[in-house]
Amino acid sequence: MNAFRYISGCLIFSMFQSAAAQQSLNLDDCQRKARVNYPMIKQFGLLEKSEEYNLSNLSKAYLPQISLNAQANYQSDAVHFPIHIPGIDLPTIDKDQYRAIIDVTQTIWDGGITSSQQKITRSANEVEIQNVEVTLYSIRERVNNLFFGVLTLDEQIRQLDILKEDLQTNFNTVNALKQNGTSMQSDVDAVQVEILNTEQQKIQLLSLRKAYTEMLSVMINEKIIDQTRLEKPDAGPVNPYGTINRPEVLLFDKQRSLFDAKKSMITAKNRPNFSFFLQGGYGKPGLNMLSNDFEFFGSGGLRFNWIFGNLYTKSNETKLIDVNRNLIDTQEETFLFNTNLQLTQIYNEIQKTKELMKKDDEIIQLRARIKLASESKYKNGVYTVNDLLKDIYAENQSRQAKILHEIQYLSSIYNYKNAQGD
């Protein structure tokens, strides 16, 4: 019985713990889940397998290469002796010939071509992987926009509830004054209309929040319910003098490494090759061209091969690689220039928002005092209900401004970090 209670308690605790875990979601989790869920991430495994197969094929270049050739032919003439020696029967060679040969070649040194091809394969695969990283990094901004969009809507909804409570309090006051004959029905109706307006605004905001959360749910492949609370991230410091660590920078390095590997191939294919060969066959004639009998034959030795034709294009190929490498340098320089411009713009936005936030609390305090004074004036009959509503909304607008400034500040900080690659 005690064991049953213990197990039941553990299950209930686990259920509550799981439910509690689903009630909150932070930005780092969203970024991680969006990356894992993005379909392109499957390319990492595919690229790894592709590199493995290509390198495996290239490593087989030093295995013995075996070929089988067979030939049967008839020729119009054959080797014969154009002399006649009395008493000696000179052999006559048949015009039909047959031959089957097995050729085995073992590369001793290919000038470094195989090694260069392996370097090119690895570098090309690293470039493809880094291209995927660049694409995956771009989803961070989309997640940020959705996440901070939901945070903004949550704060606006919360502030709208406060406004509605404030309007409801004043509605009760106006209605009581109307019962006492010191206020008109039109005043009651005016406040009631504003309460209904706030309810309509809330419906719109809730609908927009649902759209945002549904898009975020698709991004992270996890259902976000209405009760899920998005945790407001900490406003960490930004480093305006930090280096740019975006995946694009590493991509440029990988592309340069690929061109270096291709340049090594140019050198390799202009070197001589050494190999060992072995031939064995059966045919008529064999190695003895004067024999008309089928017989086995074989030969072997070392082979030296040096193709000089590649030297004609070596200079232009090297220059072309240098040109392409300079293009990568120019692209990187342009990327860093544009990114630094973007960082400067975002940093100025952060500083501006920070200065605005310093005034928000003071403005709210003053607007609250003005509203309290307006409520007193209305009760004393020296203020109209429209004047009162105007001051109520002015206080609400000041609170809304503070909310927007706070979320904009956080969003700008994370946009800065994202642009910097932090």
Image (cartoon, helix red, strand yellow):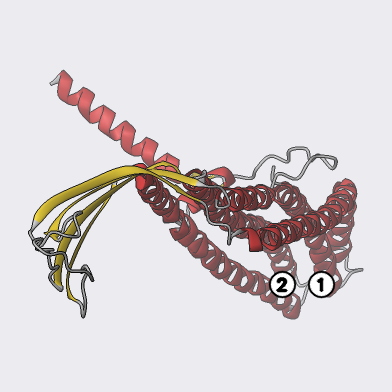
Q: Which residue is mark 1?
A: 385
Is label 2 in a helix, a strand or a loop? helix
Give above or below for 96 relative to 324. Answer: below
Q: Position of residue 179 (x, y in %)?
A: 70, 70
Q: Residue furthest front?
A: 86
Give above or below for 74 relative to 329. Answer: below
Mark 2 is on which residue type?
A: Val
Q: Position of residue 289 (x, y in %)?
A: 20, 59
Is label 1 in a helix, a strand or a loop? helix
Where on the picture, by quarter, is residue 372?
bottom right
Q: Are marks 2 and 1 in contact (CB under 8 Å)?
A: yes
Q: Position of residue 374 (x, y in %)?
A: 87, 62
Mark 1 is on which residue type?
A: Val
Q: Which residue is mark 2?
A: 191
Count how many numbered circles sit on residues in the image: 2
Q: Nearer the viewer, residue 62 or 116?
A: 62
Label 2 crowd (10 A; few <14 / some 14-19 / many >=20):
many
- The quarter in which the N terminus is drawn is top left
Give above or below for 254 relative to 194. Answer: above
User: Residue, x 27% and y 28% (percent of image)?
Assistant: 10
Side (left or right) of 300 relative to 165: left
Q: Nearer the viewer, residue 237 or 157?
A: 237
**Residue 30, labelled with which disc?**
none
Q: Nearer the viewer, residue 199 or 273?
A: 273
In the rendered structure, which disc, 2 or 1, sits on the residue that comes first in sequence?
Answer: 2
User: Residue, x 16% and y 64% (percent of image)?
Assistant: 85
Distance Cα–Cα, label 2 vs label 1: 8 Å
